Amino acid sequence: MATQHNKPKPYLSTVIFGALSISFYVLLFSNETMVTDTFTRGGIYTLFPVGTAFLFSFIHGAFASNLLSVLGIEAKKK
């Protein structure tokens, strides 16, 4: 029989990553013209959209993972 370990739920991490995610989206969309002008310059500026995509992916992924843990949705363990 398997025993369950009661891990504390990551409430604080969920709130922090959720706030970061919302903040970054607000910053991105409120500066849409500047972002478009900068990201379409070419050359070394080509790294900006790639870096931004990685940053958004990491922050949103961390938020989603923590939120699912808070809701009690975990991967099935064999």
Image (cartoon, rainbow, N blue to C red):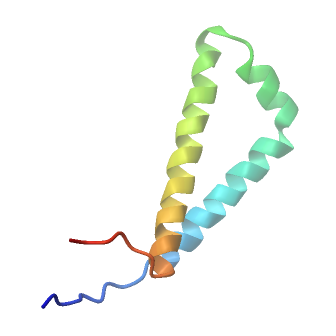
Q: Is residue 41 above or below residue 18?
A: above
- Residue located farthest toward the left when viewing the structure as drawn: 1
Residue 8, percent from left and from top: 36, 85
Question: If the image is split into quadrants, where does the C terminus sit?
Answer: bottom left
The image shows residue 53, relative to residue 47, as above or below, that is: below
Q: Nearer the viewer, residue 70 or 25?
A: 70
Q: Residue at 74% across / 17% down in the picture?
A: 40
* Residue name at image x 32 percent, y 71 percent: 76
Q: Nearer the viewer, residue 50 or 74?
A: 74
Q: Viewer-proximal residue, 74 or 30?
A: 74
Residue 73 on image: x %, y % = 45, 76
> What is the number of callouts on the image?
0
Give the side of residue 46 with respect to residue 27, left or right.
left
**Quarter placement of the N terminus:** bottom left
Instruction: Write the residue at 62% across / 26% down.
Output: 48
Q: Which residue is located at x 51 percent, y 76 percent?
A: 12
In percent of width and height, residue 49 lies at 63, 28
Left or right: residue 74 versus residue 41 is left
Q: Is residue 56 above or below residue 13?
A: above
Q: Is residue 69 left or right of residue 25?
A: left
Would you place residue 47 above or below residue 23 in this image? above
